[in-house]
Amino acid sequence: MMEELKGKRKEIKDITLKILELVKKRLKLAKEIGDIKRKLNLPVEDYNVEAELKREVIDYCNRENLDPQLGLKVLSLLIQESIKLEKENDTFTLSKVIQEAKRLEKEGKEVIHLEVGELDFEPVKEALEGIKEGLRKGLYRYSDAKGDLELRSRLAKEFNQIYSLNLKEDNILITPGGRFALYLTFKSLLKMGEEVIGFEPIYPPYRQICELEGIRFIPIRTELEKGWSPDINLVQKNISKLTRMMIINYPNNPTGKILSRKEMEELIGIAKDWDLFILNDEVYSSFSFKGPFNSLLTFNYDKSIVISSFSKSHSMSGFRVGYIIAKEETIDKMVKLQSLMITCMPPFLQYSALKALEAKTKKFVEEVKRRAEEVSKRLKDLPVRFYEPDGALYIFPEVIKKEFNSDKFVKDMLYKHGVALASGKNFGDYPKNFRLSLCQPIERLLESIDKMKKELE
């Protein structure tokens, strides 16, 4: 019997190595396909091809008495790795722009930073005083992994007042910034090989975190011609048995779009039908220019998750204080992981955030709105079209020129004109778009647009 066992184990080992050999061949082909697509200026992802492949995998599994879920998970991982290869050296990424801008500044060159969404305002004074007071109070020891009770209670009270909710402190988890909150959410609730859907153009870390964790990100394209509104039919078409979460980000980075209540209801209806988590990154919710913002929390869906932070609303980007709002059982899953990874948030920074909630921030919103209006007027002198933002901190113009390439334009603007921008390709298949941030004084913004006009002539 032992010899038979050894033989079976050797057979398994040989099959495993053969599988890896085939994976290697598949990845080589994927790289070659990526090179061809680049030359033909085709998008990396083709959802019709992927959908057909999924159908064939399901048919094969059914014929061969294999679990289709297993087949789809394996396919999801293979596609994820193929996409990574096809995208190598494909984009002048935002991180490259930031690195190059810093290098140029070290060389003594002036750079106007329109590539990142970091407000040029000073943090609210209450936050600065709160750090000093917190340290004087001795708030520099370990604290609750879930976050300071007083801060969570105060946040719950704020949301309850604004949106007529019934949140408790245990519905809130304090995190080191909004980006870590995203990672914590994905890591706690999703497994390798599962899928999430999100709407492009989209904030890059959603996809990047999925790739890191072996989760398949399924992008749903939205278009300027349709006001960046999601196509509900396309959403339904791209959901599968592996889909576990829908990601939305409104007010949107990079487009400035805010969905109507009807559009939100349609998306939540789909999430309910498929029993999906739905996550809205509401970090820009205070920057709503055209009426009150409809938080995901107001729709009373049990599997809703809202992420936000103090980085934008209170100009506290370096403080790294974010938070997650969700059902208590969902929060408890995340607390276990946060406790393991970081132990706790620094209590004096949490106290600073608590004091920041006393600040008046309307002036921030009014100034960003003014910038959005002035920049929109000036952009109309350029060969571009764009959606005038409903909120957030960005505008996402599309250049109306046949041979335009966003990566090249962003490089030229940085190296020739000292203006740092973000290529549209960072946010999906948008090679004719670029993102500009409204986080500079109006004079600098208008100066930058004049330089863009010169480059585009």
Image: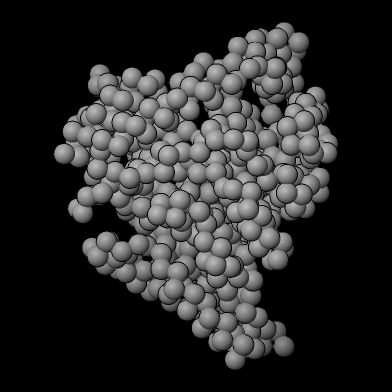
224 or 146, which lies in front?
Answer: 224
- Image point (49%, 75%), residue name: 51
Question: Residue visible at 69% across and 66% down?
Answer: 274
- Residue 201 visible in the shown view: yes
> With 166 as the anchor, is 109 left or right in this view?
left
Count of marks, rendered view: 0
Q: Residue at x 63, y 17 (%)?
A: 360
Direction from residue 204 to residue 321 in the image, left or right:
right
Q: Nearer the viewer, residue 78 or 216?
A: 216
**x and y percentages locating residue 454 in the rendered image:** 18, 33
Q: Quadrant of the C terminus?
A: top left
- Viewer-side residue, 275 vs 187: 275
Residue, far bottom: 63
Task: Place residue 235 in its image quadrant.
Answer: bottom right
Q: 298 or 335, which lies in front?
A: 298
Residue 220 left/right relative to 386: right
Up-down relation of residue 154 to residue 386 (above or below): above
Asked if 69 appears above or below 178 in the picture, the reply is below
Residue 170 percent across, percent down from the top left: 82, 38
Q: Residue at x 80, y 24 (%)?
A: 150
Q: Position of residue 231 (x, y in %)?
A: 52, 61
User: Quarter of the image containing the N terminus?
Assistant: bottom right
Locate residue 307: give its quadrant.
top right
Q: Is residue 345 above or below residue 382?
A: above
Q: Work out whether residue 419 can be spotted.
A: no
Q: Residue furthest left?
A: 457
Where does residue 264 sit, x and y in percent of width and height? 63, 52
